[in-house]
Image (cartoon, rainbow, N blue to C red):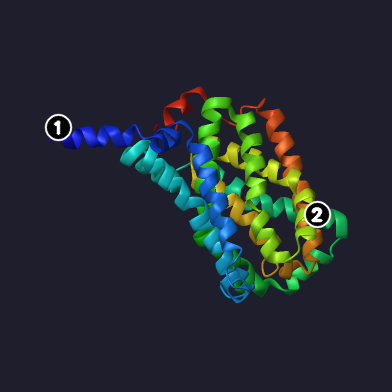
Amino acid sequence: MAERFADVRAADASPLRSGINRHPIATFLVLVYATTAALVFVPRGLTEPGLLPGGATPHGVLVNVLGSAVPAFIVTALVSGRAGVRDLARRSVRWRVPLRWYLISLLAPLLIFLIAVTILYGLAPLRALGQNWLQLLTAFLPALAIMILLNNVAEEIGWTGFVFARFQDRHGPLRAALLTGVFFWLFHLPSFYVETRSWATTALVLGIFLLPHLGSRFITGWLYNGADSSVLIAGLFHSMHNAIVNSTGLVAVVALPQFEVLVIMAGIVVLAAAIIAVATRGHLGRKRSSVANAPAG
C-alpha cells in the first residue's frame, strides 16, 4: 500500500503533470490547435457543406466537439479531478437562469440584424422574409438547432467555460476577454483554410474578422457572467449569430449576399461589445460573489 501511494506521489510530481497543473490554459491550447490542425487533413469529401441538416459539416462538428469541448474536459480532469469535471459540466448545461438571458442571447441578435438590414436596404429584406417565411422552418430553425446541439455550445465549453473563466480569475473580465479573443481568433485559422483552400484568402478573412472575434468574447463573457456562469447562454448567442450568417440559415430567407450579412453582423458585434464594455465599466457583468462560482482548481 505504501509503495502504491509513493508511485502516485511520484506520478503527480512528474514534470509533465506539474507543467499541466501550472499551465492548464497553455495545455488546452496545445491540444486544441493540434487537433484542429490535424482535422485540416480530413479528406475534402467529408468536409463539404450540406452533408448535415442546416448546412453544418462534419468538419465543423469535429472541430468544435473534439477540438474545443473535449480538450477542456481532459485538462480539467487532469488539473481538478472529478470535482472540476462536474463543475464544468454543470456550468455547460446551466439552464435555470432568468428569462431575459434567453431573450438577449436568442432574440436580440435577430431583431437587431433585421433592424440593421432594413436601415441599409429598405423594406426588401422584410418582403423577402415574408415571401420566404416557410424557409424559417425548413432552413433557419434547422440551422439554429444544429448550431446549438453540435457546434457552438460545445465550442463555448472550451472558450468560455474553460479559457475565459480561468483567465478572468487571474486577469479580470476585460483582459480575459481580450486574451481569449486572440486565441479564439487563431483557433479559426484551420477552419477558414478548409473553407477557402487558400492560405492567402485565409489570412485576408482572419484580418477582416479580427475585431468581430474579439468583440464576440466581450459579449459571450458578459452573457456568461450575467447568467450565473452559464456556458449554455453564451452558446445560444453564438449559435444564433452563426444561424443568421449561415448560407442555409437566415441568409437564404432574407435573400441577401452572405458576405454582406457577415459584414453587417460583424459591425453589430463590435458595436455591441463596445457598448457592453463601457456600460459595465469593464466588469462584463461579473459580480464579486461570482468568484465563488470560479472553476474548480
Q: Is residue 71 left or right of residue 256?
A: left
Above or below residue 22? Residue 220 is below
Q: Which residue occupies the foreground of this view, 243 or 108?
A: 243
Looking at the rendered structure, the kind of residue marked 1 is: Ala
The spot of residue 82 in percent (x, y) is: 31, 41
Q: Which residue occupies the foreground of this view, 150 or 255?
A: 150
Q: Residue at x 81, y 57 (%)?
A: 117
Does residue 227 appear in this view?
no
Above or below residue 232? Residue 136 is below
Q: Which residue is drawn at 59% across and 73% down?
A: 43
Looking at the rendered structure, the kind of residue marked 2 is: Leu
Above or below residue 90? Residue 154 is below
Q: Decide: few, some or many residues near mark 2? Use Cα within 10 Å; few <14, some 14-19, many ≥20.
A: few
The spot of residue 252 in percent (x, y) is: 72, 70
Residue furthest top as drawn:
288
Q: Which residue occupies the foreground of this view, 124 or 13?
A: 13
Q: Which of marks 2 and 1 is nearer the N terminus?
A: 1
> Total of numbered circles in the picture?
2
The spot of residue 170 in percent (x, y) is: 53, 26
Q: Which residue occupies the foreground of this view, 48 or 90?
A: 48
SS for tag 2?
A: helix
Q: Decide: few, some or many residues near mark 1? Use Cα within 10 Å; few <14, some 14-19, many ≥20.
A: few
Quarter holding the C terminus is top left
SS for tag 1?
A: helix
Quarter holding the N terminus is top left
Residue at which label 1 appears: 2
Q: Nearer the viewer, mark 2 or mark 1?
A: 1
Q: Residue 131 carries which label?
A: none
Label 2 with label 1: CB-CB less than 8 Å: no
Q: Is residue 227 left or right of residue 177?
A: left
Residue at which label 2 appears: 204
